[in-house]
Image (tube, grey):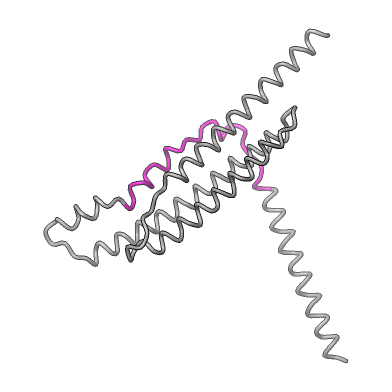
Amino acid sequence: MSLVICSAAFLALLVALAFVVLFRRLATTAKSASIDSEWWRDFSIDRYRPMERLLFQGDWEFLAAQPGFCPSIARRLKSQRRHLLRQYLRRLGGDFDKLHRAAKLLLLHSPEDRPDLAMALLKQRWIFLCNVAGLHCRLVLQPVGLAEVNLGCLLEALGSMRDQVAGLAAGLQTSASVRVGVRAASG
């Protein structure tokens, strides 16, 4: 009998802990979900252009042609550059999330219902996440020469998301000025 009570108490404790973790995560997400209305206007994907050169093959060829070249130095440098690329990817993912949240908020405040655009945003997020996962897999396989790392699709997705946010914001501004103009004309 005491084994059943102990098991039930342990299970209740695990459920309570899961709820605490869930509510904490939701609370921090809600806090971090606030978006500076001007952030996306100053955002540029140019800050991620250096990513494209981190694993550039020409660098390794140049390094190998230098006197005193040691393969261990090249391996260490490649490892450091892959680490930097992963850091860039984390930031890129964070910026994509911010842009995605901004697009969803603008869509929410839009005067017209756009389920097609909401579905497009969802699809774009899914494609972005799949591309990031694929890139991480290629980064793991890259040291043994089994995969080539191409960042173009991620930068293109990020630029596309920024353009969508700009388009939604412009549409929202236009509809707001039309509503203000209609109120002023009727008043």
**Is residue 114 shown above or below 181?**
below
Q: What residue appears at the point 44 percent right and 56 percent down from the top-left corner?
A: 86
Picture quarter containing residue 98?
Answer: top right
Q: Where is residue 14? Give x, y as percent.
A: 75, 74
Q: What residue appears at the point 58 percent right and 40 percent down from the top-left corner?
A: 99
Q: Which residues are magenta?
A: 31-55
**Is residue 55 shown above or below 72?**
above
Q: How many marks?
A: 0
Q: Main secondary structure of the magenta part?
A: helix
Picture quarter containing residue 179?
Answer: top right
Q: Where is residue 173? Give x, y as percent.
A: 66, 23
Q: What residue appears at the point 82 percent right and 9 percent down from the top-left corner?
A: 186
Picture quarter containing residue 72?
Answer: bottom left
Q: Where is residue 153? Give x, y as percent.
A: 46, 45
Question: Which quadrant is the C terminus positioned in?
Answer: top right
Front-lying residue, 27 or 157: 157
Left-right relation of 1 to 77: right
Front-lying residue, 174 or 5: 174
User: Per the image, is 53 magenta?
Assistant: yes
User: Per the image, is 65 magenta?
Assistant: no
Question: Which quadrant is the N terminus positioned in?
Answer: bottom right
Left-right relation of 134 to 79: right
Q: What residue appears at the point 38 percent right and 47 percent down from the top-left corner?
A: 51
Q: Where is residue 128? Give x, y as percent.
A: 54, 48
Tell which residue pokes out farthest to the left in this image: 67
Front-lying residue, 69 or 113: 113
